[in-house]
Amino acid sequence: MPQNEKGNDARALCEVVVDIALYAGKMAGQNKFSLPEDSSAFSKSLVEAAQQFESVFDKDAHGDDYFVLVDAYAQHWLSGNKGLALMVLDGMKSTSEIRRSSPEEMAQKLGIAYTPYQYLPNPAKCALEYLDCQADRSIEKLHSYLDHYFTVTGQTCDEHIRWSCEEIAKRRFGLTA
């Protein structure tokens, strides 16, 4: 299977093409986009836009935010706001540089004190994702999920990780302590 310069296979590019096309359908349904008469030229430009996105997308740095990023990029690109679409890509480049830093450097650059999601141990990520699946979310439930996942994996959840998960849950789900 062909590989692009980032080492992702062609399926990744196809996924971006499909996601942008789906967003075009969504916008068309809202009367915010209409397909050009020259579908061949549009298809070619769609693939080029997807290649631009894929050339910047870094699964390690952006994986959790893929849908938000591709939708933002697609919205601007399909609306003809190429400058804003490029700003999304520039922001992704900056995020990649920050996320390649150590957890401490990244937190400092972002102006935060908690451990970012990507650097949390797996039991902490599992607890946050399980909390995401629940209709009734609370910090107390988060603590019980942390206790459970850390216990079954034979690990210990220190106070910093617990606090980091709380901060992420507050930001992600709008929870209060």
Image (tube, rainbow, N blue to C red):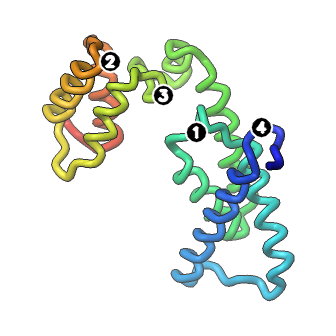
Disc number at residue 161?
2
Q: Circle 1: is it few (<14), some (14-19), or many (20+) Cα within 10 Å?
A: some
The residue singled out by tag 4 in the image is 6
Of 56 and 5, which appears nearest the observer?
Answer: 5
Tell me where residue 152 sits by quadrant: top left
Residue drawn at point x = 86 percent, y = 76 percent? 41
Residue 24 at what x, y percent from top left?
62, 73
Lower position in the chain sequence, tag 2 or tag 3: 3
Tag 4 secondary structure: loop
- Above or below 113: residue 169: below
Residue labelled with disc 3: 118
Q: Residues within 10 Å of mark 2 (few under 14, many from 20)?
A: many
Q: Is residue 79 left or right of residue 136?
A: right
**How many angstroms separate mark 2 from mark 3 (CA)?**
12 Å
Q: Is the C-beta separation of discs 1 and 2 under 8 Å?
A: no
Q: Which mark is residue 81?
A: none
Q: N-terminal of the two: label 3 or label 1?
A: 1
Task: Give the CA separation, mark 2 to mark 4.
Answer: 32 Å
Q: Which residue is mark 1?
A: 62
Choose top left, top right, bottom left or bottom right for residue 21.
Answer: bottom right
Task: For the C terminus, give its image quadrant.
Answer: top left
Helix, strand or loop at label 2? It is: helix
The residue tagged with tag 3: helix, strand or loop?
helix
